[in-house]
């Protein structure tokens, strides 16, 4: 098989080739059998029609097209492996030559992982870590009485009777996309969600729910707490832990944003579109969970989904760029998620989400755990 590969803009490649005539002809009988398997001919059982009868009933072009599909389905993965092409999208295939006892000519266009020129990410991490250490204050991690009381109020509000949000008017004029994910759930944080603020009730005000009384009975209903004092002690420890996690996430964000700023590569359009799909899907889920219809929400904003895709394009591009950079650092440094941790994470996902696809759960777990290892590696500089 003759093959030539041409690089195109935006991380695309075009593969042009010819499959030798004798190799292509070898697919004739299997193609005829496959098409004939579904053909009904009077006097013959389905799938038992003689080859000469099939040839008279099936147009030759149909057989040739099936031969081409079978040949490329079998040969394409071998071409990618042979030419060391990291394809990341469905390919566009066009046939340039199609005739019996002739070579099969074809062109295949696909998107590939871009070549990434990384900066000295170890030194970037080292400098940012040093700067953060010099500027950090111990008092930043202390929990004030006001913070503790505000958190208790928030918890009481979360346990108050729910207000029916359905058919109310959202006041937010510009939705906020989910924040850039870093190590994410590996640190115990749930995925960030967009903020959709303001739901208008009668008279233009949001009715305040009646808060449950804060007593020993209430705190015991929240978990294994002995009394109010025990609850406050453990809550204070948890708030401090969240502050430490938040501080670490901010530091990680500084490191990765500097690495992104100094990296050189083109982000494939298909990856940006994938991230935009995720942003809109999460936004729609959040709006629906509030008891609102996403279509009504868009109507109130006087926007379409395409308008939102344009607004969030920079966010989508940033997320795609982040994923590519973390993937490249993982390859360079040989960082992978331990199989036993992946299996444990997948089991937890499938336990909480019964309808989740196991393969997608595994890919998600591998991605989250590998990213966490990369950030731990950068922090170790």
Image (cartoon, grey):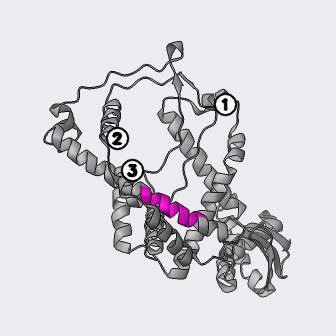
Q: Quadrant of residue 77?
A: bottom right
Apparent side of residue 24 relative to residue 163 in the rendered image (left or right): right
- Looking at the picture, tell me which residue is in the foreground, 265 or 297: 265
The CA distance from mark 2 to mark 3 is 34 Å
- Does the magenta portion include 15? no
Q: What range of the chain is rendered magenta?
A: 247-257
Against 368, residue 203 (above or below) is above
Q: Is residue 350 visible?
A: no
Pick out the residue farthest to the left: 226
Q: Is residue 314 visible?
A: yes
- Residue at 61 percent of width and 28 percent of height: 296
- Residue designated by label 1: 301
In terms of sequence position, does the residue under pointer 1 or pointer 3 come before the other? Answer: 1
Against 174, residue 373 (above or below) is below
Q: Which mark is residue 147?
A: 2
- Residue at 54 percent of width and 16 percent of height: 204
Across and down, in percent, residue 159 comes to: 31, 31
Q: Quadrant of residue 39?
A: bottom right
In terms of sequence position, does the residue under pointer 2 or pointer 1 come before the other? Answer: 2
Q: Are marks 2 and 1 in contact (CB under 8 Å)?
A: no
- Residue at 65 percent of width and 75 percent of height: 86
The CA distance from mark 2 to mark 1 is 35 Å
- Label 1's element? helix
- Residue designated by label 3: 353
Judge depth for marks 2 and 1 and give the one in front.
2
Across and down, in percent, residue 47 comes to: 62, 65
Across and down, in percent, residue 203 comes to: 52, 12
Q: Residues within 10 Å of mark 3 (few under 14, many from 20)?
A: few
- Label 2's element? helix
């Amino acid at each position: 098989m003759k093959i030539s590969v041409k690089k195109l803009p935006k991380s695309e490649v075009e593969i042009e080739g010819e499959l030798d005539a004798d190799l292509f002809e070898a697919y004739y009988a299997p193609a005829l059998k496959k098409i004939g398997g579904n053909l009904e001919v009077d006097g013959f059982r389905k799938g038992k029609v003689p080859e000469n009868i099939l040839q008279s009933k099936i147009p030759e072009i149909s057989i040739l097209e099936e031969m081409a599909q079978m040949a490329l389905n079998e040969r394409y993965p071998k071409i990618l492996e042979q030419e060391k092409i990291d394809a990341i999208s469905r390919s566009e295939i066009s046939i340039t030559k199609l005739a019996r006892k002739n070579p099969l000519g074809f062109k295949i266009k696909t998107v590939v992982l871009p070549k990434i020129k990384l900066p000295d990410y170890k030194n970037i991490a080292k400098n940012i870590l040093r700067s953060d250490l010099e500027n950090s204050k111990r008092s930043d991690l202390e929990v004030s009485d006001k913070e503790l009381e505000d958190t208790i109020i928030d918890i009481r509000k979360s346990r108050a009777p729910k207000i029916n949000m359905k058919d109310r008017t959202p006041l937010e004029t510009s939705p906020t996309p989910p924040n850039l994910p870093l190590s994410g759930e590996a640190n115990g944080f749930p995925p960030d969600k967009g903020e959709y603020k303001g739901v208008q009730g009668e008279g233009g005000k949001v009715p305040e729910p009646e808060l449950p009384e804060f007593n020993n009975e209430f705190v015991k209903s929240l978990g294994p707490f002995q009394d109010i004092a025990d609850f406050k002690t453990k809550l204070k420890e948890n708030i401090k832990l969240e502050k430490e996690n938040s501080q670490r996430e901010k530091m990680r964000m500084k490191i990765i944003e500097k690495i992104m700023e100094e990296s050189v590569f083109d982000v494939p359009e298909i990856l940006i579109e994938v991230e935009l799909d995720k942003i809109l899907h999460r936004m729609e889920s959040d709006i629906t969970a509030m008891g609102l219809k996403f279509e009504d929400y868009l109507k109130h904003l006087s926007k379409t989904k395409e308008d939102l895709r344009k607004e969030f394009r920079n966010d989508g591009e940033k997320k795609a760029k982040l994923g590519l950079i973390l993937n490249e650092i993982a390859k360079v440094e040989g960082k992978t998620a331990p199989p036993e941790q992946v299996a444990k994470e997948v089991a937890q996902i499938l336990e909480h989400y019964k309808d989740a696809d196991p393969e997608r759960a595994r890919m998600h777990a591998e991605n989250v755990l590998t990213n966490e290892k990369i950030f731990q590696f950068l922090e170790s500089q």
